[in-house]
Amino acid sequence: MLIYSYTDDSYREYTDSREGVLDPLETIRLGKDVYLYPRNSTTVTPPSCGYKEVATWQNNAWKVEKDYRGDVWYNTKYEAIIINFIGDPHRLELFSPDDLPVCGEFESLIYDNGWKTIKDYRGFTWYTKNREPVLITSIGDPHEQGLISQEELNALPELPKPMPILNPVQIRLQFLTHNVSDTDVETAINSSKLADKQKKQLLAYWYYSLYYLHDNKMLISICTLVGITDIEKEFRIGTEL
């Protein structure tokens, strides 16, 4: 007769089988074969087990249970867990690698009543519509925040170059290309119909300003008085002088 042994713990996992040993005294006394039963053993034949299964002795009967001990599964926070128990890990909301969807490039997994993939650009720089850089620090599609990627930024048309600022030498050289000197500027101002206070302000601006902006109202007035109309063009050319 075969004797089947199981572990001395809560699982009572089947370990091995061996030929039973007769109890000589009881066999003679009762006149029939009486076997010695080691602790944690039975004569009930355990069932056949498949892959990742094990037989356990529960409630005086064998039970086939899942056995993933040593395998790496994942909890709902996508933290790796090494299985160290007998039984189906799914009952503890653990998931095998086969349970998880495949992630593509720049994707991560999240659990929200089931696993799903989500965009993950953390650590990368994206850009606002004003082309200001933003470091991505959270998962999700940055497009939903109105951001664009480096590739999308590169595909945008170039922004117009900012209007330059001219210094006194540059603006006077540019005016001279129109044959307008300091004297001509002063004459045009003084002969205009502007109030005396305005004339003094324009002359002070022309002679003492440290820099000139193309949209300054006083510069626009001076250009109008001397017959220069395309101020932006003059500024862009003026930086080359």
Image (cartoon, rainbow, N blue to C red):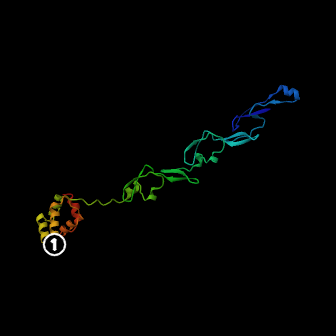
Quadrant in which the C terminus appears: bottom left
Q: Position of residue 238 (x, y in %)?
A: 20, 60
Quadrant in which the N terminus appears: top right
Q: Quadrant of residue 45?
A: top right
Residue type at the position of mark 1 = Ala
Taking depth in this image into account, of 107 and 155 the one nearest to the observer is: 107
Q: Quadrant of residue 57?
A: top right
Above/below status of 42 relative to 97? above
Query: Helix, strand or loop at disc 1?
Result: loop
Taking depth in this image into account, of 106 and 87 the one nearest to the observer is: 87
Q: Is residue 75 left or right of residue 191?
A: right
Q: Position of residue 225 (x, y in %)?
A: 17, 70
Extreme bottom residue here? 193
Residue identified by numbered label 1:
195
Q: State the residue at coordinates (88%, 27%).
A: 29
Taking depth in this image into account, of 70 and 11 the one nearest to the observer is: 11
Q: Position of residue 204 (x, y in %)?
A: 15, 63
Q: Is residue 175 left or right of residue 158?
A: left
- Category of crowding for the residue at label 1, using alpha-carbon neighbours closer than 10 angstroms: few (below 14), some (14–19), many (at least 20): few
Above/below status of 166 relative to 17? below
Q: Is residue 139 left or right of residue 39?
A: left
Q: Note whether residue 104 is visible.
A: no
Q: Position of residue 51 (x, y in %)?
A: 66, 41
Taking depth in this image into account, of 176 and 109 the one nearest to the observer is: 109
